[in-house]
Image: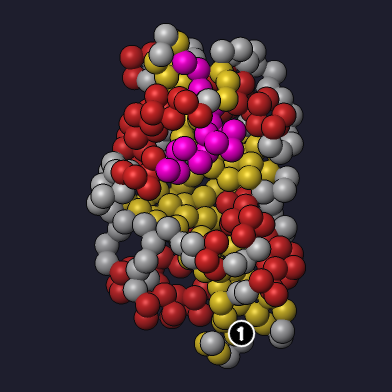
Amino acid sequence: MTTATTGVLRVLAPRDLRQCLDVLDQDPVSHCFVSSRVRTTGLDSWRLGGEVWGWSEGGVLTSLLYLGANLVPVETTPDARRGFADRLRRIGRRCSSIVGPADEVAHLWPMLSDAWGAARDVRAHQPLLVMDTDSPFPADPRVRRVREDEVDLLLPACIAMFTEEVGVSPLAGGAADAYRARVAELVRHGRAYARVDDGVVVFKAEIGAVSDSVCQVQGVWVAPEFRGQGLGAPGMSAVVALSRLHHTPVVSLYVNDFNNVARRVYERVGFRGHGEFSTVLF
């Protein structure tokens, strides 16, 4: 346990679940990813595959930090970020990225950069978008849930999208089996959607996180040979409708500010701004 002048830092346990959810529920859209992990695992560290750190002031839990493959700040105060950064510098980098509300990431990352080394990329402005109705844009009726026998059909599209978006292959460092298992898990839980024409994935997207009221879309991709044919907007319109039918009434995603094509598609579909994220990639 680390004590600072204004707060106490500790690793949260299942007994802290209610207080943790109270913090997450302050902004269900921004905190969808961490909320999904916490609600699924009940803060059991073995199932969580990481830790959630809490910062308390006056005995009240005010700030969280999710530490897994990603590092995600949640409702962090300046004092909490300093406390979290002190411990993070001591233990060294364990994550592949920092992602979260832009103002919190912008404050946290400079306190870590000297100890953790240079980032591979910093994407400082990523609009966080949301919809709570079906799209007025006509949906592509051929977008559907991916079947379990189609995992190996979807997998190359997922690898291509990830490599294009992040700049490195998700299979790097011997991670091929783990990545395939993650894709298969999304398919098994009905969270992978695609349009498949003659055995070819031409459009796809997955639901990367599902909390009690919000789901977050990830991996939106149109095969390069089919780009410019107007598949993105009807595909996303279908994903929104299917997500609201099968998962949660509110659908969110975040997008790089420089991806003008995607931003225009999301605007046409009906997404509106909710906030801004930042991502630091290692």
Q: Residue furthest front?
A: 149
- Height in image: 151 above or below 54? above
Q: Residue at x 55, y 48 (%)?
A: 276
Q: Which residues are magenta?
A: 181-196
Quadrant location, the N terminus? bottom right
Give the vertical position of 119 relative to 113 (above or below): above
State the residue in front, 213 or 85.
213
The residue closer to the viewer here, 43 or 100, is 43
Residue 262 visible in image:
no
Residue bearing mark 1:
7
Asked whether residue 227 is drawn in magenta, I would say: no
Badge 1 amino acid: Gly
Examine the image and state in which quarter residue 52 appears. Answer: bottom right
Q: Is residue 148 left or right of residue 139?
A: left
What x and y, as percent, mark residue 238?
61, 21
Is 193 a magenta residue?
A: yes
